[in-house]
Amino acid sequence: MVESENERAQVAECLRQSAGEVLETMFFLSVEREAGWEEVAHKEHLYAEMDFQGAAEGRLELAVSRDIAPVLAAGFLGKEEPELTQPEIEGVVCELANMLCGSVLSRLESQSLFQLGAPQMTQSDLECLSRMDAGHKCVFDLGLGDVKLCFWMWREARAA
Amino acid sequence: MAYDVLIVDDSPAMRSFIGRVLGLTGMEIGERLEAGHGREALEILGRSWVDVILTDINMPVMNGEEFLEQVAARGDLKTVPVVVVSTDSTGTRVERMMSLGAKGYVKKPFSPESLREELERVLEVSHG
């Protein structure tokens, strides 16, 4: 679908608001600034993705830089970083994706019904990069690391 | 009075978070039970009494909607308040879950204060 500039701006603002709210409320971290995609390209990230269906279809992909993933997990689980296991860190990254997706959809389509898929860890952001032009992407610098988001939503019902 | 709580969520991380936040609310929490989906929760409820249930919506095996329907159908559970804790907080979804029998709704992300307020409301805790 072709989005107007207004629609793109609306989605971008929802991504900002959702990231700020989720990170501050659940992880006690603030977004210091929005960064450029290229700025963090050299960093290693953990990737998670999830799909949604219903009033609209789409996908959210999340990348959390490896330097801040344990910080997020420690804050969320109330543990010290050395105590954390890799599955615990990945579980928190998936939960972050889940909360971000729900938050964005609630802002964009407040009177619609969605079925959210289960968030899953993935190996790379190739899917994200290949579809970059079609979706929305943003990078949030949290000081100790970054969080990258890619979001796509198709509002129109697909023909049967 | 200490409240026994059942947390139903397929994410171990979220179950752990909710449990920790419950401790931060200042409410007296007794036994804290956990289930990964609705069916497991029903099995637990078959052998344990709880004062309140906190449940997610999107879960495998038995989701939150089916779980609410099952709870409503069981006479022995009709007095146990169910609070939905979910990222899915569109107006339509909230209305649907409340129509299925949920007594409260907490939108993720949430603060300890908002969880406490909702629990106190559904449990009719008085500060008199």
Image: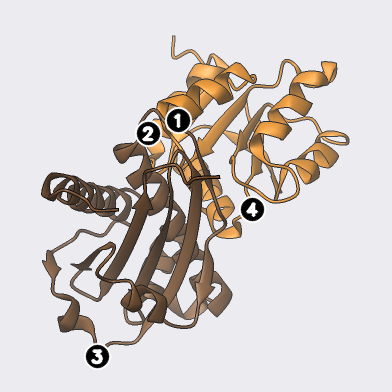
Q: Percent from the top left, x then y, of residue A103?
A: 36, 45
Q: Secondary structure at mark 1?
A: helix
Q: Quadrant of the C terminus of chain A?
A: top right
In the image, residue B29 sits, relative to residue A17, either above or below, namely: above
Chain drawn in brown = A
For the residue marked with disc 3, what is the amino acid?
His
Residue at the outermost top position: B128
The disc at residue B113 is 2
Using the rendered image, report if marks 1 and 2 lie on a common chain.
yes
Chain drawn in orange = B
Please indicate, yes or no, whether residue B11 appears anywhere in the rendered image: yes
The residue depicted at 81 percent of the width and 37 percent of the height is B42
A62 relative to A146 in the view: left or right: right
| Residue holding disc 4 | B10
Between residues B74 and A78, which one lies in front from this camera angle? B74
Q: Chain of mark 3?
A: A
